[in-house]
Image: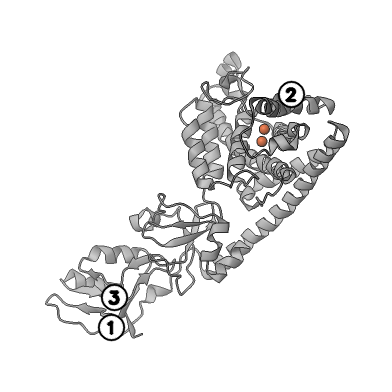
Amino acid sequence: METDTITIDKLIDIVSRGGYVRTGVDVFNKKGVLLIEKNISIRSINPLLVIKKYGVYDIPINLSNSGGVWDESGKPISFTTEKNEDSSIDGPFGSENLEKKIKEINAQKKEAAEKYIRAKKSIVKVISDIKKSGGEFEVAPVEETVTDILNFIAQNNSAFFYLSKEIFSYDDYLYNHSVNTCTIGTAILIQFNEKFGEIINNYLSTISVEALDAQGAPASMSFIYYLPEELHDIALGYFLHDLGKVLIPAEILNKKGNRTQSEFELIKKHSFEKGIQILEKNNLKNPFLSNTVGYHHSRLFQDEKGCYPNDKHPIELPPYVKICKLADIYDAMTSKRCYKEAQNPVGVVTEIFRKYANKDRILQFILRSFIKIVGIYPPGSVLYLKNGQMAYVLDSQGPILIPFTDPAGSVLKSKSDPIDMNEGLVNDVEMGIDRRRPLKSPVEAYDFLPSYLKSAVQ
Ligand SMILES: [Fe+2]
Ligand SMILES: [Fe+2]
């Protein structure tokens, strides 16, 4: 392929004097985003200025594929290949940084996998103890497991995305669901607590100490900020929230067809009756635990259907219980069960958001924390840019993406650098994420990926 290079400044000069350029080859920036299509004739300097802004200083022209540069009278301009001095400028991620980032993510995944296995062993033991004794289990090791999860999530709140979701049996479902609800719920809880902490601090800083003494801290806010030991008790509640199910016959829990009314009534008891009984048998009287176990299927707004028990008005339900309910629904919907397939996480987030948005203010805060944690693009998934290119999600924060196809879906020949979507340049229409096209989960995306990204997924 005969490709010459012309500097962007020279092209801007030619086009500003009425000339035009056709590259004859698709031109990508270092991050793999398509900037110029091969068959388009550029007759205005604006796209060239944008391209320069993106750090592309040398433009390839394929003369043998109808590419070329012409002056204002349509006469071809000959040029010799020359390199712009600035072309060595690199973005925030060189390929070295890409390797580093992939290594970091793999290390986190490994750590998460180890913690997940430990947590699963812990819940397996609890469930087998309960089955044997009819309700009693060894509490201390579970406390340790939950402390470990809480500390891990506090350091890295998207860690639960690295956790496995392969579920094949009822027992496995309950084990995985306990760990997942605990990790997702704890991540949302920490996010919520931090946001509320900020609000309380801001509020307190606006009033004088004398005024505070006179009126006290605002009751509706102060009770919402959870202290570290409370966070621990809540996380333990998330881990144990469905324990009552152990005392419900598995054939009813796993029934594939429609359940009868009496079967459904029995299942409901796993929370407010069986779950509470188990807590009492183990002398676990802490309200953070009993509220979570007893009310994690209650209403989040007054007219919500199919909830139980309904003896508390949604306003009375503590925020941490509401968080448990959202984490529980999210995990149940995105998990495969013996009677249903897993739903796409992005669709699930949208569904949950639509259902619970614009109810009460606290729920709004909880929902915001929920979206911040799970509504992001999971690492390892694949999405589409608005120009049709497919991109791999390297990190949810940003998100940081690696485009790996051209707009027609063919895999790019060279490895692209990651793009941080937080940077200003992604405001450009072409480079935005196409939110109308469904995200592919890591499992769905695997076959599309070039080999260097496959190693990042494993
Ligand atoms: Fe439940
Ligand atoms: Fe649950």
Q: Which residue lies furthest to the top in this view?
A: 214
Other residues around mark 3 within 10 Å, as few (<14) / some (14–19) / many (≥20)? many
Q: Relative to residue 410, is residue 298 depicted above or below? A: above
Q: Earlier in the sequence, mark 3 or mark 2?
A: 3
Q: Is residue 235 left or right of residue 354?
A: right
> What x and y, as percent, mark residue 60?
33, 77
**In what element is the residue under mark 1?**
helix
Q: Relative to residue 313, is residue 407 depicted above or below? A: below
Does ligand 2 reach within 8 Å of label 1's beta carbon? no
Query: Looking at the figure, which quarter contains the N terminus?
Result: bottom left
Observer-side mark, 2 or 1, equals: 2
Query: Looking at the figure, which quarter contains the C terminus?
Result: bottom right
* Labelled disc at residue 23: 3
Q: Residue furthest left?
A: 73
> What x and y, as percent, mark residue 48?
28, 67
**In what element is the residue under mark 2?**
helix
**In what element is the residue under mark 3?**
loop
Q: Earlier in the sequence, mark 2 or mark 1?
A: 1
Q: In this view, does 175 lie to the left or right of 326?
A: right
From the image, tell me which residue sits under label 2: 273
* Labelled disc at residue 63: 1
Other residues around mark 2 within 10 Å, as few (<14) / some (14–19) / many (≥20)? some
The residue type indicated by label 3 comes to: Thr
Res. 218 visible in picture? no
Whether pointer 3 and pointer 2 mark residues with C-beta atoms closer than 8 Å, the reply is: no
The residue type indicated by label 2 comes to: Glu
Mark 3 → mark 2, Cα distance in angstroms: 72 Å
Res. 115 visible in picture? yes
Q: Quadrant of ligand 2?
A: top right
